[in-house]
Each structure stands twice: as structure tokens, then as C-alpha cells.
Amino acid sequence: MASRTVSKDIITLRGSAAIVSEFFGYAANSILYNRGVYPEESFTKVKKYGLTMLLTQDEGVKAFIANLTSQLSEWLEAGKLQRIVLVIMSKATSEVLERWNFNIETDSEVVEKGAIKEKSDKEIMREIQAIMRQVASCITYLPCLDEPCVFDVLAYTDTDVDAPGTWVESDAKLISNPQMVKLHSFDTKIHKVDTLVSYKKDEWDEE
């Protein structure tokens, strides 16, 4: 009698934390590239999520993002991370020009009871692809950044989290009366990530 093996796409808390933290690493690289925060020639092309992605070759930025994603994974696995914000600021004045918000909802049952969920890797990848395509096309809906910029990352965690020594308390780095564009979201069934970019109005828009 013929038989067949049926496999299930099991998502664990640790696996979901790894997916989300890795996503943020690639998303941060893509934002820094597409917003021109670092020179185009300082990035190299790689294949990820079925797309051509850009990764920085700047050793300082690489180390920063690697340390960041490692810490995010730890907080995600503990169910303590609420939001990550990548902030782009004027290098000269520190004025906040853009805030890339990644809001995170965590299934508390999984954190508390160790439950597992099911969702195919392909479906998650398709959802992430949609976000990455929107980031890559951001020049079509965001004003040009025509001055040298720097970036920072803010992490919103539960109040009982002890931040490592490399993290410091910060203000929210908000933008007054921002314009907002809601991007796609993705969901591992354990962590749901909603993406929104807010930006400073172009002076031409205010006239």
C-alpha cells in the first residue's frame, strides 16, 4: 500500500524570534541603502527572501547591526519587545527626518506556555518580500534626503527589562506633524510585525 509523508511547517518561539530579528537586520540595511545614508559603493548584493538585497560592508555598521539583531532576538524570545524604530536624522542638526516603525505583537500564550504554531516558510517569505519591495521603492513616496544623514535605533521594551550597557535611555525622537505611510505587515503566528514610516514634510508641501 502506498504511503506519503506529510510535513508541517512548525514555528517555535525561538524560530520566530530568529525570523523577526533577521528581517530587521536586512530591513535596516535596505533602508540605509535606499535612503542614501551610506554610499552606494559601500554595499554588496546578496540573495535573500527571493530578492536581491543590499548589505553594508562598513565594518562599524555591520557590527552595530549584528549586535542589534542578537539583542532583539533575545527580547523577542522573552516576549519583551514592543517596537523597534530606525530613526534617520540630519548629521548637521540632529533633526529627525524619518522614523521607520516596526510594531511587534507577541502571542503571550506561546511565551507563557511554550505552544507552537504552524505557518509555511513560503507564506512568511512572501509577506516579508512585500515589505522589502516597498522599502526598495521608497523614493517614490518619500522626499529626497538632500543632506548628510546619520541613523539610530530605538527599542521599546516592557518596563521590567534591564537594558544592556550598550543601550541608553532616549527620548522618542519624534517628528512634529509628520506625514505617514503604512507599509505591509508580516506574521509568523507568534510575532506580528506592522510597518509604518513617518517623515518630515517637504517644505514645498507646506506652502
Image (cartoon, helix red, strand yellow):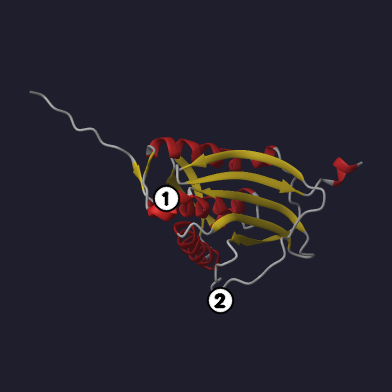
The residue type indicated by label 1 comes to Val
The x and y percentages for residue 125 are: 44, 39
Residue furthest to the top: 1
Q: Residue 181 shows which numbered tag?
A: none
Question: Which sits in the foreground, 11 or 43?
Answer: 11
What residue is rendered at 56% in x and 54% in y? 28
Query: What's the residue type where badge 2 is placed?
Result: Gly
- Quarter of the image with the N terminus is top left
Is 128 placed above or below 83 here? above
Q: Nearer the viewer, mark 1 or mark 2?
A: 1
Mark 2, residue position: 165
Residue at x 78%, y 47% (from the top left corner): 178
Relative side of 36 to 67, left or right: right
Depth order, front residue of 36/132: 132
Q: Residue furthest bottom?
A: 165
Image position of 5 (left or right of 53): left
Q: Where, quadrant-wise, is the C terminus in this rendering?
A: top right
Looking at the image, tell me whether mark 1 or mark 2 is earlier in sequence order: 1
Q: Position of residue 23 (x, y in %)?
A: 49, 50
Q: Which residue is mark 1?
A: 110
